[in-house]
Structures are given as structure tokens and as C-alpha cells.
Image: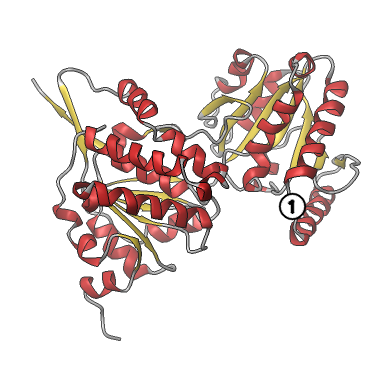
Amino acid sequence: MQMLSATEVLEHLDYLVGDAALAADLPNVAARLTFDDRILSFLNDISQTLLHSENAKAYSDVISFAFWIRRASLLRLRERFRPAEDRLMLGRGVAFHIAPSNVPVNFAYSLAAGLLTGNANIVRVPTKDYPQIRILSDAFQQALERHEDIRPYLILVRYARDHTVNDLLSSMADIRIVWGGEQTIAELRTSPLPPRSLEICFADRFSLAVIESEAYLAAENKRKIAEDFFNDTFLFDQNACTSPRFILWTGGRIREAKELFWAEEHRLVQEKYTLQPIQSVDKFALCCRIAASHPGVSVVRQPDNLIVRTALEKLSADLTDQTGSSGFFYEYDCADIRELSVLCAQKRCQTIAYLGDPEKLLPPVLSGGRGVDRIVPLGHTMDFDLLWDGYNLVSMMARTVSII
């Protein structure tokens, strides 16, 4: 079989933004300082385009991204990650991003992180034709017409799994950012990186929510709490690693709080969520598997299967490998917050969303486990930050020049 040249490989890609010539020239693009003013202006331009787009307004995840890249937001990030006076921080060079297939807007956050840290970026977007990807790509294109100097720093491509393409783009990369499951990561790691290149892998994780019963009952706006929980979970069918799968209740009024919480959530889900038949089947099948393998587990009776609540007699680490989606939750009444250590000890435990006092969560988090990278208020699990999955993306995606 005849081997394709690098030029031929690049020409066969589907470019949403950029082209084969720009891709071939990526290794020659100059690195920029982190939080370069021109990059901030470019991203702010995209933000304004999206915030004034009727098409974009139909997708809350697109609008959330638009708010994240506003100038005011980016200036706060620049202040937080400002290097010491005796240091400069510049991009490493070429950043090769592999976006996850199940979260439409994730690629844009990864790209923005690459731009803010001064890199030239080539991003493989999901092969599924999400409308959000088209909206964002159009906004990028429009902004590039007004910021021609940024054009070499932003390439979006779409291609099916292809080892040849991965090999080529990895050989050009100074940093490779992989979002995906274990299979995706293993596949990418068969494509070698240059000796001084780095890799950041965002593997499959699970998250949980801890709700203090008294805090919930004392809250005046329970509809707002339901909306926050909906955004954390149903908005992406729990496909995001940040979406809580385990719901733990604490305090002395758990039964009362649960009844009100789930009733309010059910009303909201009925209004805003469409459950597909295959999702119903998947949730039922998971219930059967869990019931067969874990004696004492029971399914809480609900008016329908929009929300499936599986009551646990005790927390079990092996359940973290059997999580569901589309409104499937494990639920546990926690008598002692230290019981949470069973989940916090797992490397795959990513985010704890809380309603109540976050200080109470510190004992299980500090118990010596290797999990938990984020503790955030309920409704904020999807909020992206340059501290993510325990990584400081600025320090990893940029290189530090010391001045002595």
C-alpha cells in the first residue's frame, strides 16, 4: 500500500476553520506570550458575535462559552495566572487537541485554553454534526476576517479515527491534549510525540453531589436549585464527567428534603427534557444489572422513568464503573460525611457539587484518597476553568522563561 505524504494526509482532512497549508506551517508559527492582548481581543470579538446571535442563543452551552471568553472574564484570568516578575510565560508551540465526542462545546474551551497560553492550535472536533460546532466555527471565521494575524493559530478539523493522521499531527505537537475514554487515550498514545513534548489526558471521570437537607429546606428559591441541578445533569444527559451520578444527602431532615427536591426536579424535567426510548431501555437494563449484582439496592418508585433513583444501603467503589445517564442517579443517606471517603479515594472521582457548607466536605477529601479535583456549588459543575482535573493548564501548556 502506498504511503501518503504529509501534504497528502493534510489535504484529505475536512477543515472547518483553516486549511492544509496553514496546518503544514504550524511548526513555524511563533509562540505568543500568555494572555496576549491580541488573543484577548480576538476571543472577545467572538464572544460579542455569539451573544448577539439568535442561533447561538438557542444553545445555553454556546452562550456559557461566550460569557467565559468575554474580555472582563479573560482579564480576571490573566490576573489570577500572572507570572512572577522574574519570569515570562510563552506558548510551547503547537497544541494538538482531541475533543470528546459527547460534549459539543468542549472543543472550544480546549482551543481557548491553547490560545490564551500562546500556542498555535489544531483541534479535532467531534465527527457528529452538532449545531453548536457549526455556530462556533462560523463565529471563529467571522472573527478571523477582522484578526488576520490570528489565523495561523486556529485550525479546526474533522476526521474519523485515523492512525496516520494522529501520527502526523502528534509528530508536530509540542503539547497534546486528549479528552476521551481509556480507549481513545490508548489509541492516541500509539502515536509518538517528540522528546520534549507534553501530554495532558482528560480521561473518563465521575462526579457527585452532596446536599444538606436543612440547607435545602431553608432555601427560598427551590425552583432555582432544580434548574441548577438540571444544568449539571440533564443538560448533557450526564455525559460530561462533571455531571453528578451519586447524590448524597446529609443532615437530620433527609426524607422531607428528598420529597420536595425530587418533586420540584421532576416538574422541571417534564417541562424541559425529552427522553428517547433507547434511553429508557438503557436505564431499565442498568437497574436490572445493579439489582442482580448488589443485594439491598432498590429503585425508588417514581411517577415515570424520567428520573431513576437507585437507593443504596452503603456506598460501594465498584458502582463507579456502572454509572448511568439520562437521569439515572445513585442515592445515599449519609450519616457521617466521612463515609464519602469510599468515593473520594477513587482516582476517577472528579467533582463534588454541594448545597450547604463546603467546609464539611474536607475530611473525606483530605483522607488520603487520590480523587476529587473540584468542589463547586450546585449548578456550577460545568463552569470551565484553567485549573481543571487537577491540572494547572497555564503552567502545563506554556513554558516558563526565568530571568535572573
Q: Amino acid at mark 1?
A: Thr
| Residue located at (75% from left, 57% from top) | 282
Q: Position of residue 205 (x, y in %)?
A: 56, 42
Residue placed farthest to the left in the image? Answer: 404
Q: Position of residue 325 (x, y in %)?
A: 69, 48
Question: Is residue 143 shown left or right of residue 297?
Answer: left
Question: Is residue 281 shown left or right of residue 204?
Answer: right
Q: Position of residue 397 (x, y in %)?
A: 29, 39
Query: Is 320 situated above or below 14?
Result: above
| Residue located at (74% from left, 33% from top) | 315
Nearer to me, 256 or 248: 256
Nearer to me, 1 or 211: 211
| Residue located at (33% from left, 54% from top) | 141
Residue 37 position by quadrant: top left
Residue 266 position by quadrant: top right
Query: Is 211 situated above or below 120?
Result: above
Question: Does residue 244 appear in the picture of this structure?
Answer: no
Query: Is 56 situated above or below 399?
Result: below
Total labels drawn: 1
Query: On the rendered image, what quadrant is the C terminus found in?
Result: top left
Q: What color scheme is it?
A: secondary structure
Residue placed farthest to the bottom in the image? Answer: 1
**Residue linked to disc 1:** 274
Question: Does residue 219 appear in the picture of this structure?
Answer: yes
| Residue located at (42% from left, 61% from top) | 187
Residue 216 position by quadrant: top right
**Neighbourhood count class around disc 1 (C-alpha, 10 Å): few under 14, some 14–19, many 20 upward:** few
Label 1: which secondary element: loop
Q: Position of residue 157 (x, y in %)?
A: 36, 61
